[in-house]
Amino acid sequence: MFNFFKKKETTLSLPDYLPFQTDIHSHILAGIDDGSPDIATSLQLVKGIYDLGIRKTVATPHVIGDIYRNSPDTINLALEELRAACVEEKINIEINAAAEYMLDDYFLKLLQDEAPLLAIHKNIILTEQSYASSSNNLNEIAFAIMTKGYRAIMAHPERYFYYHNNYESYGHLKDMGFYLQVNVLSLTGYYGKSVAKAAKYILDNDMADFVGTDMHHTRHLAILQKKESLELFKRHLDKRTYNVLSDY
Ligand SMILES: [Fe+2]
């Protein structure tokens, strides 16, 4: 029998935005690392994240001794170029710049020489390790970072395969003083199944302090824009509001 009182089915409204408004990890500055190759691409990426609700972004070009010896000079020059292009295109987004420091000998030398490091916010710097193996003496490096007055975020801990058989390592990183930053793209399986699993573990156990896009190119942007991706991010990022820099 037809039920007149049957509730009308409603379509679930799909999220149109990323579940955070500040991005703290991206490679959107033009021509200084393996991210955006030119200013036109940078603008495309910035417009893309603006449309996804990002209103503040901290670009983090790589600083890797063997490949990208970026300095405050090269980074700030690229930042000014992108800011000017955004003004021209009337994109109302705040763009700052820091760096993503590989924990290599070059970084240790910068630290020892007390070269000014580019921070995400106050004294917080973004760091990464090699995907091949964990940095030697990570404990000592973490201690040296704090001795020099910085706090380090470990970028995408879920992407280091050598931690996949030992999730306790994430807790050890936090014990060493690292904040953890998960790439939202990891959740989609973009970097592989084991990376997605590790990302979910870190987020679902509320061990992530920050999240980021780590956006390098338009292929990354296209995945961020997918409805399924946005739903997935929302589901795993519901523990807290991420990337509120004024909290730090
Ligand atoms: Fe990165």
Image (spheres, rainbow, N blue to C red):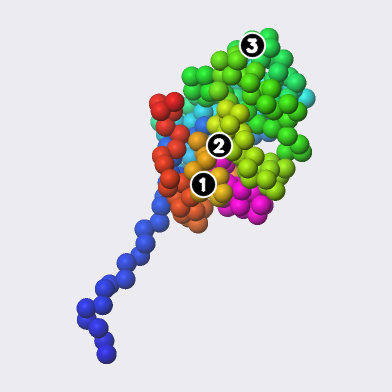
Q: Position of residue 238 (x, y in %)?
A: 42, 47
Please give the name of the residue rendered at 73% of the width and 19% of the height, measured from the top-left corner: 106
Mark linked to residue 181: 2
Query: Residue 115: which disc?
Result: 3
Q: Nearer the viewer, residue 131 or 226?
A: 131
Disc 1 from disc 2: Cα separation: 13 Å
Q: CA distance from mark 2 to mark 3?
A: 24 Å
- Label 3's element? loop
Q: Residue 188: horizontal and vertical position, in percent?
A: 58, 52
Spot the residue most to the left.
5
The picture places residue 125, in percent across and down from the top left corner, at 57, 24
The amino acid beneath tag 1 is Asn
Residue annotated with mark 1: 205
Q: Secondary structure at mark 1?
A: loop
Q: Residue at x 69, y 28 (%)?
A: 138
The x and y percentages for residue 66 are 77, 25
